[in-house]
Image (cartoon, grey):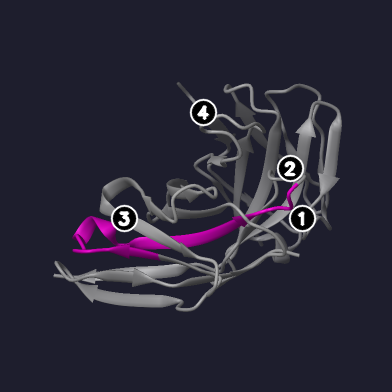
Amino acid sequence: NAGVTQTPKFRILKIGQSMTLQCTQDMNHNYMYWYRQDPGMGLKLIYYSVGAGITDKGEVPNGYNVSRSTTEDFPLRLELAAPSQTSVYFCASSYSGVVSGANVLTFGAGSRLTVL
Amino acid sequence: AQSVTQLDSHVSVSEGTPVLLRCNYSSSYSPSLFWYVQHPNKGLQLLLKYTSAATLVKGINGFEAEFKKSETSFHLTKPSAHMSDAAEYFCVVSGSYDNFNKFYFGSGTKLNVKP
């Protein structure tokens, strides 16, 4: 019963490096999301996906890219890391519907990224 | 557009005393509202959810919240705080009537519980 799994949990990058944060869910949820959390700012939506092959920008997409080739996986790519991308990143998923448990976010444990 | 305002960034209570965490929302229709809790260095866990059924919603760990449409509020309460309640709490409103799977977060309230 894994839920939403994120890797890595911690990562330090140098300015200009690239990396991918991995996210996998085993609940067959159609929606997946990437949020970043900065102190005192709550969570800001970076990108989301409503299903395999469909992605859309959230509030703060600049500097990031995503893809959704399968229902289960939703990786987040940082192409040229900048200090402003130092944050905690959360992947989440949900499913649409009218049954109990629908339209509720389930979160991964988070990935702490530091860019120096 | 939907938005959420959490009125206190920090709340400090003594163990055994009541907890009140305040949340006001803005929405052009009847929203779904949530409270999530985040313990230090952990992910976010759903505490409770309001979806236009009963206005008083009971959640896990003795928490409850009341939806007040006239006041556009969804405050979180607990009669008696426990040390394990120390965490950050987020109020969340869902998206529009045709997109319930977009969620908007408040900036969070850190709850400190003193022995």
User: What segment is highlighted magenta in the picture?
Assistant: B76-97
Q: Which mark is residue A81?
A: 1
Residue hosting label 4: A3
The chain ID associated with circle 1 is A
Q: Earlier in the sequence, mark 2 or mark 4?
A: 4
Name the chain letter of the residue that bears numbered label 2: A
Quadrant for residue A81, please give it. Answer: bottom right
Residue under numbered circle 2: A19
Callout 2 touching callout 1 (CB < 8 Å): yes
Q: Measure the C-alpha gap from mark 3 to mark 2.
A: 40 Å
A49 is within the stretch colored magenta: no
Mark 2 residue type: Met
Q: Quadrant of residue B14?
A: bottom left
Alpha carbon of mark 4 to alpha carbon of mark 3: how far?
24 Å
Q: Which of marks 2 and 1 is nearer the N terminus?
A: 2
Given this view, does label 3 or label 1 mark the residue nearer the observer?
Answer: 3
Judging from the image, what secondary structure is the residue with disc 2 in?
Answer: strand
Tag shown at residue B63: 3
Q: Residue flagged by tag 3: what amino acid is it?
A: Phe
Query: Where is residue A23 shown, x and y percent of the image?
Result: 64, 33
